[in-house]
């Protein structure tokens, strides 16, 4: 073996040793996805403290707290409007057996989504959150998916509900109302919401079309545990 060959083999051996050492030093103790997913076979869950804040809007509350359904929604979103009747039916059927939580997630491309969320929030300050929430969905075909402001439309809904109009308009434009809506959106982003509607049932993101039957199936499974 020539001196040059010996030198080449020595360099190659050193490279292999260094590479192996780097792999051992930088390798995590266990795969990240296992850490995120928890016990083997369990789906990843979102932190309960982020999914439901103390000021989150609970449309109904379960006495035992066994099952919680959280929906991140955009009031201008057609898919959210399509899911709305099923959610209302589930709420009526389960009553106080399931907690239903509504959280805002206005999509930037929807001209009136944030304003609609603020209108619901402002109505809530006068005890009319749910009536305004329903009016938004029932009338969505008249105001949704349009590139014009529907502020006057929402003021009309407030009058229809008999709200104190000066107080409603003040709340509608208040920075605190804007911040409240944006805080929900930020939490949604934190837990991986990318579109609407996005549901979490006992912390696990629901996948697939959120039909009445599909949501009911998961809720029943959680109640049976």
Image (cartoon, helix red, strand yellow):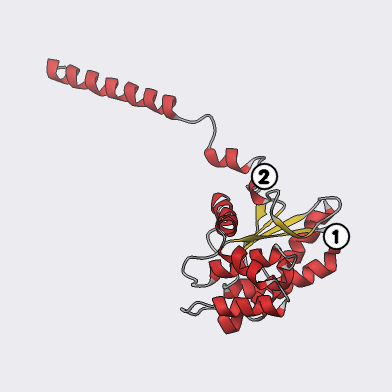
Q: Is residue 198 above or below residue 30?
A: below
Quarter location, residue 82: bottom right
Sequence-first tag of 1 and 2: 2
Q: Is residue 210 above or below residue 162?
A: above
Q: Position of residue 195 (x, y in %)?
A: 54, 63
Q: Residue at x 32, y 25 (%)?
A: 16
Residue wearing tag 1: 96
Q: Residues within 10 Å of mark 2 (few under 14, many from 20)?
A: few
Q: Position of residue 47 (x, y in %)?
A: 64, 45
In front of the other: 152 or 116: 152
Quarter location, residue 4: top left
Q: Position of residue 13 (x, y in %)?
A: 28, 21
In this picture, residue 220 sits left or right of residue 144: right
In this picture, residue 110 sits left or right of residue 220: left
Which mark is on residue 122?
none
Tag 2, which secondary structure? helix
Q: Position of residue 106 (x, y in %)?
A: 55, 64
């Amino acid at each position: 073996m020539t001196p040059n060959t010996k030198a080449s083999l020595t360099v190659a051996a050193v490279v292999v040793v260094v590479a192996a050492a780097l792999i051992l030093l930088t390798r995590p103790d266990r795969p990240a996805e296992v850490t995120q997913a928890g016990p083997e076979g369990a789906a990843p869950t979102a932190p309960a403290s982020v999914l439901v804040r103390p000021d989150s809007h609970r449309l109904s509350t379960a006495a035992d707290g066994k099952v919680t359904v959280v929906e991140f929604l955009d009031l201008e979103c057609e898919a959210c409007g399509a899911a709305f009747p099923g959610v209302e039916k589930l709420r009526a059927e389960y009553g106080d057996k399931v907690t239903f939580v509504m959280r805002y997630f206005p999509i930037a491309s929807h001209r009136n989504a944030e304003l609609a969320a603020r209108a619901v929030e402002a109505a809530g300050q006068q005890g009319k959150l749910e009536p305004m929430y329903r009016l938004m969905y029932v009338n969505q075909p008249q105001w949704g998916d349009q590139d014009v402001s529907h502020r006057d439309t929402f003021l009309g809904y407030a009058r229809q509900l008999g709200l104190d109009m000066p107080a409603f308009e003040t709340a509608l434009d208040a920075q605190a109302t804007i911040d409240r809506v944006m805080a929900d959106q930020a939490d949604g982003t934190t837990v991986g919401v990318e579109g609407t509607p996005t549901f979490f049932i006992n912390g696990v993101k629901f996948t697939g079309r959120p039909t009445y039957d599909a949501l009911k199936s998961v809720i029943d499974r959680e109640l049976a545990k």
